[in-house]
C-alpha cells in the first residue's frame, strides 16, 4: 500500500467543520477567538480539532489578516552575499517584533516585482522592503511612487533600501548608506600609498549604486588634483565573473595601472583570480581593494582591503522604521555611515 504524503493526509479546516457539524467560517471564528460563538458550538469545534489533530496554517492566517502579521522583503538576487546579510537582519528583527517575513527574489524582472507588491497589498502586509540599486529614471520614480501610494492606501509602508529616493511627498522611507563617501575614502587610501594609475572595475553605468561608487572614485582623484584616465574606468556588473573578465581584458590590453579598486568584493575576488592566473602577486605587483566587507573578504589571500557596509543593521533598521511609522507619513530619508577596513591587499607603491 502506498503511504499518503504528509500534505495529503493533513486535516483541513473543512474536515474539522464537517466533523463538528458547523461551517468552515465558524471553525475559523472559534480558532481566531475574535468573534462570539455559543459555548456548545465552541466545545464541538474544539473536540473535532483534537480528534483530527488539526493545526492551523500560520501562513494562511497571516494572509487572511489573522494571527502573525507579515512583512515582505523584495530583492533582485537572494544569492548575493550582501543581500543575504541584509535579509538576515530583516528576518531577525521581524521575528523579534513578532512578524512573519516573506522573501521574494525578482531576478531583475520589474513586472514580477510589481505583481509581488500588489499581492502584499492585497494581503495587507505591514510593510514591503525593496532592496538594491536601480536606474534612477522617470519611469522608475513613477512606478515606485504608485507602489508607495497603493501600499499606503491599504495601511502598509514602502521602504527603499539602497534605491533612489522618489522626491518629496511620497509615503515612503528611504534608507541608504554613504555609498559615494565609502568609495571616496577607499580610493583616497589607495592614492595615499603612492598609486597614481588606479584601475576601477565598476558596475552597470545606469545603476544607482554603481554610479555612487564611481563618483567616489572620481572625486578622490580630483581632490588630489588628478583626472583619472578614461581607459581606467571599466563597466560590468557586480559579480565575480564580471571582475574576472574585466581584469583579464585590462591585462590583455596592457593597460598601465599599479592598483585596482573593484566595485564589490565579489568583483575583487574575480579580479584576484585573474591576476593570479597572469602570474601577478597581490599586493607585491598590484594592489587590490573591494567594497562591501562581506564575510569571505577577510579569508581571501591576501585578506581584502574594503569598505564596510552595515548590511545587517540596514535590514534591522528597515523593519524597525517601517513598523514604527503611520503608512501615510511623508517621505523620510535615513543615511548610515561606512568605513574603510584596511587589510593586506593594498601596499605602498614601490619606487
Image: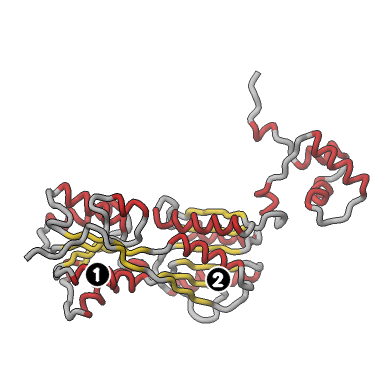
- The location of residue 123, given as percent across then percent down, is 65, 58
- The location of residue 179, given as percent across then percent down, is 36, 70
- Work out which quarter of the rendered image holds the C terminus and state it: bottom left
- Quarter of the image where one finds residue 229: bottom left
Front one among 141 and 307: 307
Q: Is residue 233 left or right of residue 7?
A: left
Q: Is residue 198 above or below residue 20?
A: below
- Residue with the mark numbered 1: 187
Outermost residue to the left = 351
- Residue with the mark numbered 2: 146
- Work out which quarter of the rendered image holds the N terminus and state it: top right
Q: Is residue 322 left or right of residue 276?
A: right
Element at label 1: helix
Residue beneath the point at 48% across and 74% down: 334
The crowding category of the residue bearing disc 2, from other C-alpha atoms within 10 Å (few below 14, some 14 to 19, many at least 20), is some
Residue beneath the point at 66% across and 68% down: 155
What count of labels does the image hold? Answer: 2
Q: CA distance from mark 2 to mark 1?
A: 38 Å
Front one among 342 and 229: 342
Residue beneath the point at 14% across and 70% down: 194
- Quarter of the image where one finds residue 215: bottom left
Residue beneath the point at 13% across and 64% down: 257
Question: Foreground mark, 2 or 1?
Answer: 1
Front one among 96 and 228: 96
Q: Is residue 227 left or right of residue 17?
A: left
Amino acid at each position: 500500500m502506498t503511504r499518503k504524503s504528509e500534505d495529503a493526509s493533513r486535516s483541513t479546516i473543512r474536515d474539522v467543520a464537517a466533523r463538528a457539524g458547523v461551517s468552515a467560517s465558524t471553525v475559523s471564528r472559534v480558532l481566531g477567538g475574535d468573534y462570539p460563538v455559543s459555548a456548545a458550538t465552541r466545545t464541538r469545534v474544539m473536540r473535532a480539532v483534537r480528534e483530527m489533530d488539526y493545526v492551523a496554517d500560520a501562513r494562511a492566517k497571516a494572509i487572511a489578516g489573522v494571527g502573525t502579521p507579515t512583512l515582505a522583503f523584495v530583492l533582485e538576487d537572494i544569492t548575493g552575499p550582501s543581500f543575504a546579510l541584509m535579509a538576515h537582519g530583516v528576518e531577525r528583527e521581524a521575528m523579534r517584533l513578532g512578524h512573519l517575513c516573506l522573501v521574494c527574489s525578482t531576478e531583475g524582472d520589474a513586472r514580477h516585482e510589481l505583481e509581488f507588491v500588489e499581492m502584499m497589498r492585497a494581503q495587507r502586509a505591514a510593510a514591503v522592503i525593496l532592496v538594491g540599486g536601480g536606474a534612477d529614471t522617470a519611469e522608475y520614480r513613477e512606478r515606485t511612487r504608485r507602489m508607495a501610494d497603493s501600499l499606503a492606501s491599504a495601511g502598509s509602508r514602502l521602504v527603499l533600501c539602497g534605491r533612489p529616493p522618489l522626491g518629496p511627498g511620497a509615503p515612503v522611507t528611504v534608507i541608504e548608506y554613504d555609498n559615494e563617501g565609502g568609495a571616496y575614502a577607499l580610493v583616497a587610501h589607495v592614492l595615499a600609498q603612492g598609486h597614481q594609475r588606479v584601475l576601477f572595475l565598476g558596475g552597470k553605468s545606469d545603476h544607482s549604486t554603481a554610479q555612487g561608487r564611481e563618483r567616489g572614485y572620481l572625486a578622490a582623484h580630483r581632490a588630489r588634483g588628478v583626472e583619472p584616465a578614461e581607459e581606467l574606468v571599466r563597466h560590468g556588473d557586480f559579480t565575480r565573473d564580471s571582475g574576472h573578465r574585466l581584469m583579464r581584458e585590462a591585462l590583455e590590453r596592457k593597460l598601465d595601472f599599479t592598483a585596482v579598486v573593484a566595485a564589490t568584493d565579489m568583483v575583487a575576488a574575480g579580479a584576484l583570480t585573474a591576476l593570479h592566473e597572469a602570474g601577478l602577486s597581490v599586493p607585491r605587483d598590484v594592489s587590490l581593494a573591494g567594497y562591501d566587507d562581506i564575510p569571505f573578504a577577510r579569508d581571501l589571500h591576501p585578506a581584502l582591503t574594503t569598505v564596510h557596509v552595515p548590511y545587517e543593521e540596514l535590514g534591522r533598521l528597515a523593519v524597525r522604521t517601517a513598523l514604527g511609522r503611520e503608512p501615510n507619513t511623508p517621505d523620510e530619508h535615513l543615511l548610515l555611515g561606512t568605513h574603510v577596513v584596511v587589510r593586506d591587499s593594498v601596499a605602498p607603491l614601490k619606487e
